[in-house]
Amino acid sequence: MLTRWDMVPFASAEAPDRHLLKVKGDAAGVRHLVSLFPKIAQEPFQIRGGDFDWGVYVAGASADARRQLGAYLAALIESGGEEPADEPAAIPAPAVPEPEKLPCLNY
């Protein structure tokens, strides 16, 4: 379960758009997070001391992709650690009357 996060620019000569995602939580939660964003999230590493437990470099991500990652984390933490739904809850199909109860026209 993840309980806190922060993302800060962490550029280098090789990766000018790189950011550091700092996360507080357990190893399973951070590994799951990385598996959901494999194209931009690199292998997590432990941070000793401070307010966070894990670091993840986020590289090759557009500003929109970083916003999506942040929105996912915010929703996850707001929900108390429950995985946010990938899609809205299914809308039940309207009830269809039985054929014999449908009005019919006699020609």
Image (tube, helix red, strand yellow):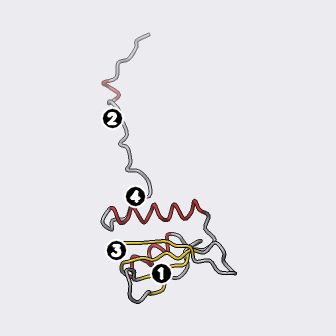
Q: Amino acid at mark 4?
A: Ala
Front-most of residues 101 and 107: 101
Residue 91, percent from left and from top: 37, 44
Mark 4 and mark 2: Cα distance apart in space: 25 Å
In the depicted structure, whether residue 46 falls above or below residue 89? below
Ranked by sequence position, the earlier of labels 2 and 1 is 1
Quadrant of residue 41 in the image? bottom right
In front of the other: label 1 or label 3?
1
In the depicted structure, whether residue 93 falls above or below residue 77? above
Front-most of residues 56 and 11: 11
Name the residue: 58% across, 72% down. 40
Q: Secondary structure at mark 1?
A: strand
Mark 2 and mark 3: Cα distance apart in space: 40 Å
Farthest residue to the bottom: give it. 48
Ranked by sequence position, the earlier of labels 3 and 4 is 3
Ranked by sequence position, the earlier of labels 1 and 3 is 3
Mark 4, residue position? 85
Residue 78, percent from left and from top: 33, 62
Q: Which mark is residue 55?
A: 1
Ranked by sequence position, the earlier of labels 4 and 1 is 1
Q: Is disc 3 surrounded by few (<14), some (14 to 19) or many (20+) residues within 10 Å?
A: some
Q: Secondary structure at mark 4?
A: loop
In front of the other: label 4 or label 1?
1
